Image (cartoon, rainbow, N blue to C red):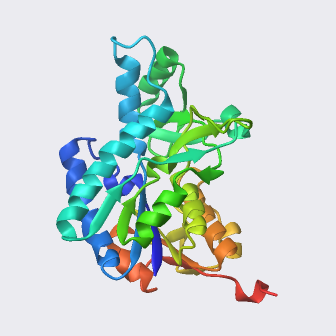
């Protein structure tokens, strides 16, 4: 079976943890254990989030007196792919001795006229008190907004159109390589309509939507979206909260999910299942193997009654 795994940023750095390398290495050891259980018998492509590290690098760059201007978001995204990809590769190399593993810097093409550039919606970086967030916004020209636990930076999140390295990923995968790619949704680039040349975009692409697109292009059988909750909840965080264990794209689209957290995950799962007829699941990192076999998480399957 061919599986694309979308690993959430909160699986690499849990909510409230300090963004220290030692903390992330400990979390990545958990990731390696879960992914290794899948990779023994299946073809695996591993994508990952980068939100906590992306925000940390953005603050460092904005405050560096040696720079005349902060490093653009696309290049910060490239740096996170290198760091997180290296940490994941090392952990998996130890957990899967003899297995071929590659971490690939990956670019995602977005449209220059995507309306998301005018309406930033993607939270990146750590949570700040309101006064600190306001000061950072004034000092660096950031857009900030209130998240569930505090205030964070908002950046544009255009839709992924296509992934530049899909052909290379396919070749590596068919050659027996576990591929780590599309970190942080991929480095956002705009392709020139005439020449095809690529230019970096000041944005962060949603990693779950990129994973769904990649899974579709690779003709994957299963999209596995791993996060820090055991399954999808309708009306999460309210007295009406209710777990969803089995769903179709239609039922997910009628649910009530936070647009900045679970919303993109359910949309990614719905798109993949609709477009391919494959299966998707959303749930906790430590239950990845059980999710693949329908014993944990939220399973998303085709709506057979809608076929024909």
Residue 130, image x, y percentages? 46, 29
Residue 138, image x, y percentages? 51, 16
Query: 133 and 32: which one is in front?
Result: 32
Residue 278, image x, y percentages? 59, 79
Quarter where residue 176 is shown: bottom left
Residue 78, image x, y percentages? 42, 39
Q: Residue at x 66, y 82 (%)?
A: 302
| Left or right for 174, reference 302 | left
Q: Residue at x 32, y 70 (%)?
A: 35
Q: Residue at x 35, y 75 (%)?
A: 287
Q: Residue at x 53, y 24 (%)?
A: 142
Label tally: 0
| Left or right for 288, reference 155 | left
Can residue 29 be seen here? The reply is no
Can residue 198 be seen here? The reply is yes
Quarter where residue 263 is shown: bottom right
Query: 151 and 250: which one is in front?
Result: 250
| Left or right for 62, reference 118 | left
25 up-or-down from 222: above or below: above
Quarter where residue 62 is shown: top left
301 up-or-down from 238: above or below: below
The C terminus is located in which quarter?
Answer: bottom right
């Amino acid at each position: 079976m061919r599986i694309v795994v979308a690993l959430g940023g909160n699986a690499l750095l849990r909510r409230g943890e300090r963004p220290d390398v030692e903390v992330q290495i400990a979390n990545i050891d958990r990731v390696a254990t879960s992914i290794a259980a899948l990779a023994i018998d299946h073809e695996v492509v591993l994508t990952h989030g980068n939100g906590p590290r992306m925000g940390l690098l953005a603050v460092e760059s904005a405050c560096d007196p040696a720079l005349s201007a902060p490093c653009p978001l696309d290049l910060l995204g490239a740096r996170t792919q290198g760091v997180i990809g290296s940490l994941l590769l090392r952990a998996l190399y130890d957990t899967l001795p003899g297995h071929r593993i590659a971490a690939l810097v990956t670019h995602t093409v977005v449209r220059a006229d995507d309306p998301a550039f005018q309406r930033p919606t993607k939270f990146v970086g750590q949570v700040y008190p309101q006064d600190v967030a306001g000061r950072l916004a004034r000092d660096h020209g950031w857009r900030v907004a209130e998240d569930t636990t505090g205030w964070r930076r908002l950046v544009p999140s255009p839709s992924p159109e296509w992934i530049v390295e899909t052909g290379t990923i396919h070749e590596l995968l068919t050659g027996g390589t576990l591929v780590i790619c599309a970190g942080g949704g991929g480095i956002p680039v705009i392709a020139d309509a005439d020449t095809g040349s690529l230019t970096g975009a000041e944005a962060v692409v949603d990693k779950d939507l990129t994973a769904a697109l990649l899974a579709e292009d690779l003709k994957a059988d299963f999209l596995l979206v791993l996060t820090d909750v055991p399954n999808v909840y309708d009306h999460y965080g309210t007295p009406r909260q209710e777990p969803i264990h089995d769903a179709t794209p239609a039922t997910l689209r009628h649910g009530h999910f936070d647009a900045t957290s679970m919303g993109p995950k359910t949309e990614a799962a719905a798109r993949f299942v609709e477009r391919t007829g494959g299966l998707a699941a959303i749930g906790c990192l430590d239950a990845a193997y059980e999710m693949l076999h329908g014993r944990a998480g939220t399973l998303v399957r085709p709506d057979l009654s809608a076929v024909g």
